[in-house]
Image (cartoon, helix red, strand yellow):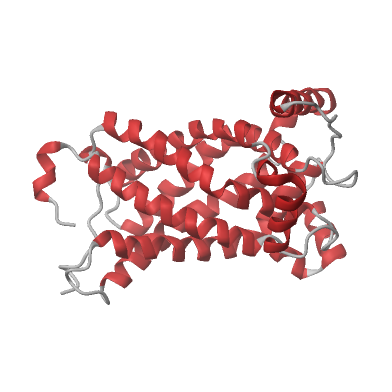
Amino acid sequence: MQEKRNIQIIEWEDLDKKKFYSFGVFMTLSIRLAVYPVTLIRTRLQVQRGMSLYKGTFDAFFKILGTEGVRGLYRGFLVNTFTLISGQGYITTYELVRKYVSNYSNNNAIKSFIAGGSASLVAQSIIVPIDVISQHLMMVGQGENYGRFKLSATAGKYGQTFGQTREVIVQILRVDGPRGFYRGYVASLLTYIPNSAMWWPFYHFFAEQLSKWTPSNCPHLIVQAVAGPLAAATASTITNPMDVIRARVQVEGKSSIIGTFRQLLREEGAWGMTKGLSARVISSAPTALALVVGYETLKKISLRPELVDSRQW
């Protein structure tokens, strides 16, 4: 019974790469568009001192919506769309490393752990400069005590989008030089490599466990759709303290991860390590749901034609 319900994994060599990349870009953009407002809220919650501006995720949402409108929830989004490049780099690295590790081990947890961590390393190397810029844009209008740079009020939709982005880039270069675009890089690696490395094994673990309890005629995609958010919530909870430190290092220009950690503990206690956790789970769970459904569907429609009939879903 359990053997019959094993979740089938489509490997890299089973895919039609043209279909995979074409549909993959659209899928990634759609997911980012859907979850960006929660990402913005999470960043603002993590950077604020105590509860000086927002009392929580929903309070922040309604305040931003009321004072800045819908556009306020998408500050920095245009810059953030460049992370599509990192998304494709992540997917490719994950699949290729997974294939390479399979030469040495057939253990799915080991393959997923190593491939997930490696994929995050590549993706973060691309995404950190974009993150640094977009996070500064997210903090626009938060008062003089938040963020390192004060941006001028640029009139017009074009000016707000491109003028402030240009200002952030110029000020980073002037204050920190090119290295400023990689501020918080180590903190990002310490956050997202463990998160990615843990998410994939947890995802496959939950999927296999859930499959043992579901009817034999239950589609695998439903099981995977439940396993994804469970894995995301688990990994996000474990890595949230490092995510808080990463956000502060990048936005406030701090240079010491340990110093930022000590300051956070001194000012806000251990509770400070949970800042933005609800926003992160709210963001990561539906993101994981969309990612799993989208990614697994993407792999199925990208399956090489000669393999379609041999698979059972």
Location of the C terminus (image quadrant): bottom left
Q: Quadrant of residue 134?
A: top right
Location of the N terminus (image quadrant): bottom left
Query: Does any portion of residue 252 appear in the rendered image?
Result: yes
Place of residue 62 in the rendered image (x, y in percent of width and height, measured from the top left): 70, 57
Place of residue 66 in the rendered image (x, y in percent of width and height, measured from the top left): 74, 52
Instruction: Using the image as rendered, state which of residue 106 and residue 132 is in the foreground.
Output: 132
Q: Measuring 48% from the left and 57% from the top, which residue is drawn there?
A: 286
Place of residue 128 in the rendered image (x, y in percent of width and height, measured from the top left): 63, 36
Q: Measuring 70% from the left and 49% from the top, which residue is drawn there?
A: 246
Q: Is residue 10 above or below residue 224?
A: above
Horizontal side of 42 relative to 108 (left or right) equals right
Q: Is residue 229 above or below residue 92?
A: below
Q: Measuring 87% from the left and 63% from the top, which residue is drawn there?
A: 267
Horizontal side of 132 relative to 120 (left or right) equals right
Q: Is residue 271 above or below residue 93?
A: below
Q: Quadrant of residue 129?
A: top right
Place of residue 310 in the rendered image (x, y in percent of width and height, measured from the top left): 9, 49
